[in-house]
Image (tube, rainbow, N blue to C red):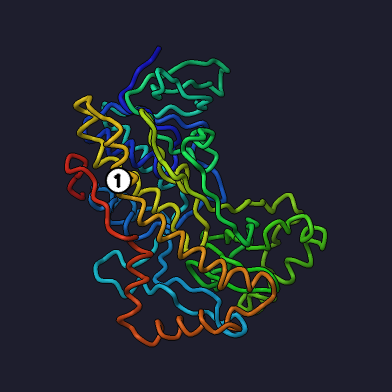
Amino acid sequence: MERTTCCVVGGGPAGMVLGLLLARAGVEVTVLEKHGDFLRDFRGDTVHPSTLRLLDDLGLADRFAALPQRHVHSIQLPIGRGGELFTVGEIGSLPGKYNYVAMVPQWDLLDLLADEAKREPTFQLRTNTEVTSFRMERGRVTGVRYRDRTSGSTGELRATLTVACDGRGSIARDLPELGLQEFACPMDVWWFRLPREESDPQGLVANAGERFLTAMIDRGDYWQCAALIPKGADAKCRAEGLDRFLSAFTEATPWMRRGPADRGPGPRSWDEVKLLDVRMDRLRRWHRPGLLCIGDAAHAMSPVFGIGINLAVEDAVAAARHLAGPLRAGTVGLADVRAVQRRRWPTTVATQGLQRIAHARVIGPLLQGRSPAAGGEPLRLAEVLTRAPWLKRAPAYFLAYGAGRERPPAESLRRSG
């Protein structure tokens, strides 16, 4: 039987950040990732100021800046009459050099974190390793059982603490004592690609169509597109035909109609349009003896505001700060993992509350063919925010940093350059 001090299940943003921070703090940590690499499309790509400042603190700002990326300085929602866009977060108004959202392919960010973590002698990343269950001894999680997806062999990894960072499909969610609480979502998401021309806008572009909303992420030579459709309407919408949808999509995106006539083809079949079943939920308890859940494993977020990655990263930073010392000393206990949830709970609840308001007042009405301005409240709020520059900073700061900035353990810091 193998052994480590901290077993991190899942090599996403939360898992890789936690692994890097703990390894730099001198903790023996093993990250288990079921895939062979990080190269998977249609994942979140928004890196908010909180994460940008963390990368700077870790001495990775220059390497991150060298990655291909676009910068977004404001977040908008189509809540005006006729789908007019209103700014709900003017991140560019915040002080400091990281007053933007960086649009970076997630696999590039994860490769950067993995390369840096591998420099630490106490870090190990094991890919193609799928966790199948927890090891349990006298009511305590004492590690995991896993299967090697390349050879088919199985094994066990004993750990002082196991941290579940394996997303909303986490095996930790099967533990009834953690108490999963679910919230209604009015939409699902279609993911697909469209060719991009140099004359197109840059960064993140949103539009509203007939019973759907779009968000288009600039990838340089193509757009990664998300279309929000009514919850459970996938089969019905597909039955209406792909050509009909693409025509409606173009109609809702005026600059595409004015673009080059020889723009390359979009999806040729529904096989190229992937469905994401949107869910929003959170565990009432993120822990039990020997186990902590963070990121989407603890709280699956709506794609509204694109903040899920950064909440997961902040969870990892808070966990590293609370747990590095006890893990090194071999004294980590239930009180230590409870402290992580207490720290992160307010931001999680507040963010999901804002997303639920956006679902009810903006997303839901638009997907039902109604103007969100009909009731007046979202439009009046947006008008107040856009007319009072000093008010713009409040929602912008929350979108950028959450309820408060998390700081990594001092041992994890490195001087930039």
- In this rendering, the answer to whether 39 lies above or below 303 is above
| Circle 1: element type | helix
Q: Is residue 68 visible?
A: yes
Query: Looking at the image, which residue is at 56% across and 22% down?
Result: 150
Whole-percent x, y for residue 221 in the image: 55, 60
Quarter-of-image position of residue 256: bottom right
- In this rendering, the answer to whether 15 lies above or below 357 is above
In the rendered image, which quarter contains the N terminus? top left
Query: Looking at the image, which residue is at 37% across and 37% down?
Result: 114
Closer-to-camera residue (100/314): 314
Label 1 neighbour load within 10 Å: few <14, some 14-19, many 20+: many
Whole-percent x, y for residue 146 in the image: 50, 22
Whole-percent x, y for residue 121 in the image: 26, 26
Q: Is residue 35 visible?
A: no
Q: Residue furthest top?
A: 1
- In this rendering, the answer to whether 277 lies above or below 204 is above
- Give the side of residue 180 with respect to residue 278, left or right: left
> Mark 1 is on which residue type?
Val
Per the image, the residue denoted by label 1 is 317
Closer-to-camera residue (275/135): 135
Image label count = 1
Quarter-of-image position of residue 255: bottom right
Closer-to-camera residue (45/338): 338
- In this rendering, the answer to whether 320 lies above or below 400 is above
Whole-percent x, y for residue 208 in the image: 62, 74
Query: Looking at the image, which residue is at 45% across and 77% down?
Result: 87
Query: Looking at the image, which residue is at 79% across and 67% down?
Result: 244
